[in-house]
Image (spheres, coloured by chain):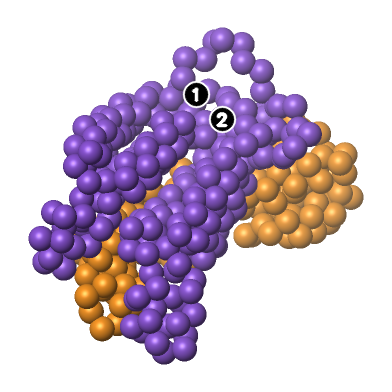
Amino acid sequence: MRNFTNDNTVRRYKAHVSLVGTTQLHLRNPYIIAWWSAAFPGFGHLLLSKYLRGYALILWELLVNNMAHLNYGIIYTFTGNFKMAKEVLEPRWLLLYLPVYIFGIWDSYRTAVDMNKVFILAERENANFNSYVIGAVEVNYLDKRRPTMAVFWSFLTPGLGQLYIHRVITAIFMVSSMIVFVYFSNVLVAVQFLFMGEISKATEVLNPQWFLFIPSQIGFGVYDAYINTVENNKLYDSEQRTFLRKNYNQYRIKIPTSDEV
Amino acid sequence: MQIISTFEHSTYLELAITAIEQLGVQKSDILAVPLVNRAQERRLFDSLHRADGISLFDKGAAIGTAFAVIGASIGFQLEWGPIYWGLIGGAVGFVIGFLIDYFINKVIHRRQRVLKGKHSEVVLVINCSNELAEKVEQLLWEHLALGVAKLED
């Protein structure tokens, strides 16, 4: 059940509160979006709320990167071991990587530029949108939340900050992929060695190919949760302003003058 | 009797309005005026109560992630290993990005300075009988009004 019925008179909505997530347009810096697409194909699109293509690009990246041993290549290149880098990269997969990688950066940049214009138009139109939904499996509504808590939870496990601000599908996607990264990279075993002070054993036990996904995953989880919590709060304020103007602006104040008393 | 109060945007504001309506005050006797707040000085981090959209978090997160990946890669060759170097890279990158944004926002684009602390975002005026006034005032305070004043007729 929702508190809004579309009557096809609105040209552009700026937000939508659905059972599985709050989707909203807001101003974004296209270069920052392009940067996240460069860090990990799909992240830029997730920031734009283009979730399906975001998930698809992430799965594509996981497959092709793992088959081409790209993370090994990155590690060997950064450590100056170019001979090993050349050896480890798999030519049957490597060139498949480039077009989609560059497309992801380009497409998310251009979409961010476009969606900023759409947002400005939607903001000027300031149409009512669905802001409350209750159903058999979830309840979602606009609310104010703490950006610091979103950062904290996403830092501990990427996806939890997304769950905090009710982006359920992305939260499930990120928490699940984190399980895969943690398991195949052996990172928790390595952390245990670090606690025991055995640094070289910790390095040995790590699987570099899978480990290298984790820094991007945490960085993105923190950034996405933070930025969307802030924007959610702004949306809350804006929705409440519109509501008050519409419903509580009838009364006019009469300040009593002294001769009236 | 008119009771004037100020609020921040929050669910408490709507709780206050509906509680006052349940006391018997008519909707037509309630005036809520959302204020356009003065542009604020860029703050380092956005909080629950305010945000200016241009956060000093953008470049920190971006460069932090980049440095974490680089640190983790090079860390395989270094004594402290990839986990420590990944964390160090992330922290150093975040600080660098943060300082760049800080420099751009605080030094190059200095904004007007305003008072810190809570901001009144909505002015709420209730017109009610003298008998209800005390209860209304109490409700306003209970729902976190920033300030309340009464005007006698």
Circles 1 and 2: CB atoms closer than 8 Å: yes
List the residue tagged with mark 2: A16
List the residue tagged with mark 1: A13
- Percent x, y of residue B124: 65, 45
- Percent x, y of residue A207: 37, 64
Residue at left 71%, top 27%? A2
- Percent x, y of residue A159: 53, 53
Q: Is B131 left, or right, of B38 in this rendering?
A: right
How far apart marks 1 and 2 lie (CA) works out to 8 Å
The answer to which of A179 and A45 lies nearer the viewer is A179
Q: Residue furthest bottom?
A: A197
Q: Colour of chain A?
A: purple
The answer to which of B136 and A59 lies nearer the viewer is A59
Q: Label 1 sits on what residue type? A: Tyr
Q: Is A228 left, or right, of A83 in this rendering?
A: right
The answer to which of A22 and A51 lies nearer the viewer is A51
| Neighbours of disc 2 within 10 Å: few (<14), some (14-19), many (20+) | some
Q: Which chain is orange?
A: B
Q: Is B101 left, or right, of A11 in this rendering?
A: left
Is residue A167 placed above or below A103 in the rendered structure? Answer: below
Q: Label 2 sits on what residue type? A: His
- Percent x, y of residue B80: 29, 82
Is residue A231 placed above or below B82 in the rendered structure? Answer: above
Is residue B47 placed above or below A90 in the rendered structure? Answer: below
Give the structural element (helix, strand or loop) at label 1: loop
Can residue B127 be seen from the camera position used here? no
Residue at left 52%, top 31%? A15
Q: Quadrant of the N terminus of chain A?
A: top right
The chain carrying label 2 is A
